[in-house]
Image (cartoon, rainbow, N blue to C red):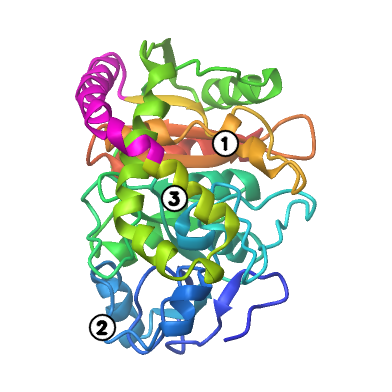
Amino acid sequence: MAASDDHAFIDRTPIGIAGTTVAVKDLIDLAGLPTTAGCRAIERAAGPAVADAACVAGLRAAIEDGTARVVGKTNLSELAMGADGINGWFGTPRNPLDPALIPGGSSSGSAVAVASGEAEVGIGSDTGGSVRVPAACCGVVGLKTTLGRVPLDGVLPLAESLDTVGPLGRDVATVARGMELLEPGFAPAAPARLVGRVRVPDEDPTIAAAVDRALAEAGFEVAEVALPSWRSALEAAYWIGFAESVRNNGALVDREPELILLRTRNAIALGRELAPREEEGRRFQRGWEAEFAVALGQAELLAWPTLAGFPPSLENFAEIDNISRTMEVNLAGLPALSQPVPTPGPLPASLQLVGPAGSEERLVATGAVVEAANRRG
């Protein structure tokens, strides 16, 4: 298996001959191809998958009728652990906006493939922001789906209480096409009119202004809405997510540490420290879900930046953990759309729209309104 020059792909084996070009994160089984999870230990032992993951049934049907084709399986942070997208085994996908910046992770290859034009649709997974963070870093659109909406059989688990699969695209219409491939029959619904603006911690003034301007130019009624427990939600999500990641990956790390990156080994070690607080995290989660229900009773959708600041450089990769405002949504199990909105500088900001469970159709329709207003502006 050879990676592409920009390290977006781990395997460029094509499937199909015509239609929408699709890049699939190498965490998701495609029959006949190995699944590596961006991990040397798994790659060394992996044989061809015997069956497709359940989530790509619609994609396989589209391949067979000539309306979609797979262009390869994409790179990712090892074992999908890492918001920066850096991979020491298969190379780090190169951010097309600026090669000095991180691509975002863990679905880094899928975002880079879309942003560079190597694929129209990228399929990624999102446990703590792994679709939305790379979308924000690379200036594309990404959709985190409602927990449980897209089946996960045949997708290597990281943390089942938080794991989701969703599409990326260069624009909202392409993300809707990606959802159609994941869920045949998917179609946008009516857009929202009332959006609740949530002020999350440490928003860069330029980012905050870009989000506010995008909402205003789209013509929404905007109300200020609060999530009072915000500052505790990320910690609770870590307690749950890391505990589950240890159960899923701890034995592999212990068995073959020399084939696991140091950063991943350190993450598993941290997970073991945090695991005793898992139940405490689940108790908080129930209250957090109720808090979202109250907020979504005040507006049809909620909005805040995907990243509180601009993507960090490769040298300062760890800063992404301080500016991501995504895992709090996974803790609530809700869907979210991230899309670029303009700033005065060379890099876009990323607007994140969050809705109630099952509101992907409205999120996509609302994102299209934002996108059209940006183009007019």
Mark 2 neighbour density, 10 Å: few (under 14) some (14–19) many (20 or more) = few
Q: Which of marks 2 and 1 is nearer the N terminus?
A: 2
- Using the numbered discs, state the Cα–Cα distance from disc 1 to disc 3 in whole angstroms: 16 Å
- Is 86 covered by the magenta stretch? no
Task: Name the mark nearer the viewer: 1 or 3.
Answer: 3
- Is 281 covered by the magenta stretch? yes
Q: Which amino acid does label 3 sit on?
A: Ile
Q: Which amino acid does label 1 sit on?
A: Asp
Q: In this view, does 153 lie to the left or right of 199?
A: left
Q: Is mark 2 on a helix, strand or loop?
A: loop
Residue 210 to residue 352: above or below: above
* Percent position of residue 144, x then y: 38, 46
Q: What stretch is highlighted in magenta?
A: 273-300
Residue 363 to residue 4: above or below: above
Q: Mark 1 points at which residue?
A: 321
Q: Is residue 255 left or right of residue 9?
A: left
Q: What element carries label 1?
A: helix
Whether the residues at callouts 1 and 3 have beta carbons within 8 Å, the answer is no
Q: In which quarter of the image is the C terminus?
A: top right
Residue 223 to residue 3: above or below: above
Residue 268's label in the rendered image is 3
Residue at 23% over, 16% down: 297
